[in-house]
Image: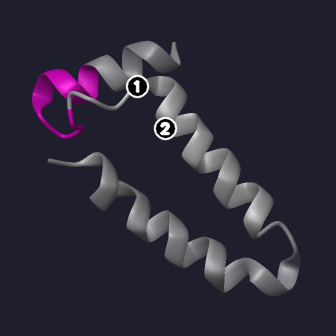
Amino acid sequence: MPYALVEAGVKVGSIRSDITATDMFAALTGIALASGRPEQREQAERLLDLTPDGLSR
């Protein structure tokens, strides 16, 4: 299923063609690990806001 979501995003042009599902989930895992404590919530939100910019063309 995750691969289908990435493929659909690539097909409509909302995700770069060189991004894989593994890349996307590694980035999200990194965000979770780097900002998993309640006092890091704002940082997690900023990182999640940056993620679409890195995925898009």
Q: Are the two marked residues, 1 and 2, in contact with CB atoms closer than 8 angstroms?
A: yes
Which is nearer the eye, 4 or 20? 20
The image quadrant that residue 6 belongs to is top left
- Residue 57 locus on image (x, y percent): 14, 47
User: To which residue does mark 2 refer?
Assistant: 24
Residue 14 is one of the magenta-drawn residues? yes
Task: Using the image, determine if residue 50 lies above or below residue 5.
Answer: below
- The secondary element bearing badge 1 is classed as loop
Residue stretch rendered in magenta on the structure: 8-16
- Determine whether, in the image, residue 10 is placed left or right of residue 20: left
Identify whether 34 is placed above or below 45.
above
- Pointer 1 residue: 20
Mark pair 1, 2: CA separation: 6 Å
**Residue at (18%, 40%) from the top-left corner?**
14
Image coordinates of residue 49 in percent, x first then y, are 43, 69
Residue 41 to residue 2: above or below: below
